Amino acid sequence: MQTFRDIFQYHLNTGKHTCETLAGKCGISVARLDAFLASTASPGVEELTLLADALAINPADLMPDETNTEKGIRYMSARESKATIREIYRKKGNREIHYYSYRDTAFSKSTPHAKGVILDIRCTAEDDVVQNNGHFQDALTLVLKGRIKGYWVDGSGRSFSRVLETGHSYFARGYVPHTYRSFSDQDIGQILSFTFTQHISGEVQKDLSRLGNDRAKENISSTNPYSNLLSCHMNNSMLKIPELAEATGIERTRIAAFIELNVIPAFYELDAIANALNISTGELIPVISDSDNGLIHLTQAESLKKLRRLRDAQRNVRYEVRDLANTKEASNFRAHHITVSSDVISDNYDIFSTEHTLIFALKNQARLTWLFDGQSHSIELQEYDSVYIEPFIRFTLTSSNRGEVVRFQYPSLSAGDARKEMFIKGTPAIERLVSEQRPWADRQTSK
Ligand SMILES: [Fe+2]
């Protein structure tokens, strides 16, 4: 875990500073800066500002992370979850309508881009329905109890509604306006909604905000995602259509059609273009959506068709796993319903995820056993308990009464392109990324 000294050393290195050169710039003594590097002193708020100004970075970039996990997990009991309930009212005309009761599930401070909430749908009358404005995150929602009606508005402003029942799950793209109601006060529906973003983190939002609306929109200025990526890399590589045609042997008119018309290049053409641009072919392939205008809806019966039985070495079934409404749009995000059908602990901790995990206990009991720093730990999960599990933690689930859990798996910020870049840099680089202990060169002096 990075301490202030690691972060300070990292920024000294990237800014090509020693304590001596920085002292002159920031007005803090060399002795005190040395003490920061020796971890015998920590900067005050004013010193942080002086350091950030001298290093040309934001003070927040110097702040170490805070975590709320213990031994790799964060557990929240059903009772703790219930204590977080807040009642939400919405206005319709002069009326205040009791709309939702929200409660939290286990969450990690290190992943503010993802959260699971349980909603009791208090609104029951068609007349009381008030559409929201849509929210930034995508959402994968599972109906826990009852029958509800969901309403949403697509990108062209058309309104839709659909009845959703216990066990149904659905994916809704971010910023799609949506709302729900139950059918009666005697049958209040309840949903578990996991909201997340894959690659558009807070840092990306800050970046777009710095660009402003006009320039931010240029990221997606074309109507064709292939054309958008191709134009972007041609501009950056300073190659125009004639040079690209020459380098690839693809007709000029065909390249123009990729850019100006909705013509999709074949893979071998993308490969030739990528070679000419000196980039990886994957950089030219966009995300292909399989959703119906931002919405995927899976009934319980459809989900059951995706059931598979995972077995141990003795061929006994350990888990009955089925997909919830997963989508190509969010390929690093996965949601599964798991029935745990064995009470024998597997010695190989058979569930492993490279990403963040939230386990929500749906029905009966399940025991979570996980490995952290070579030690085994275990916790019994009752209905509506939840656990956040850090990436790369091996764990196993057992149950004597076919406990059912939902597993949400959402990408860590070091997944995807960051993982590919780290692979190229290699293991020694990872050690320095985790904790920078060394200056970029030894025995430097300055005058
Ligand atoms: Fe929502």
Image: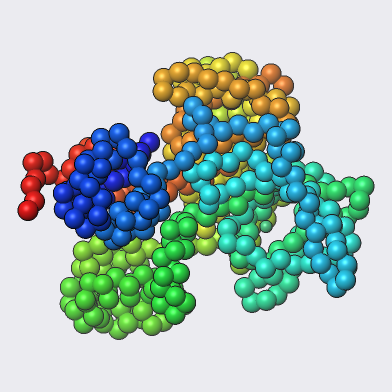
Q: Is residue 215 visible?
A: yes
Viewer-closest of 17 and 29: 29
User: Where in the figure is residue 80, as x and y percent of width and height?
Assistant: 70, 34
Q: Is residue 352 left or right of residue 114?
A: left
Residue at x 22%, y 77% (from the top left corner) = 239
Q: Which quadrant is the N terminus positioned in?
A: top left
Q: Is residue 345 above or below residue 62?
A: above
User: Where in the figure is residue 102, as x and y percent of width and height?
Assistant: 73, 49
Say which quarter of the image contains residue 360.
Answer: top right
Viewer-closest of 65 and 367: 65
Viewer-closest of 398 and 80: 80
Q: Is residue 138 left or right of residue 267?
A: right
Q: Is residue 330 above or below residue 320?
A: below
Residue at x 38%, y 74% (from the top left corner) = 227
Q: Is residue 165 above or below residue 105?
A: below
Viewer-closest of 307 and 77: 77
Q: How is the image coloured?
A: rainbow
Q: How many marks?
A: 0
Residue at x 49%, y 44% (from the top left corner) = 110
User: Where in the figure is residue 17, as x and y percent of width and height?
Assistant: 18, 52
Q: Is residue 406 visible?
A: no
Q: Is residue 128 above or below residue 218?
A: above
User: Where in the figure is residue 275, as x and y percent of width and height?
Assistant: 22, 64
Residue at x 22%, y 72% (from the top left corner) = 237
Q: Ligand 1 quadrant? A: bottom right
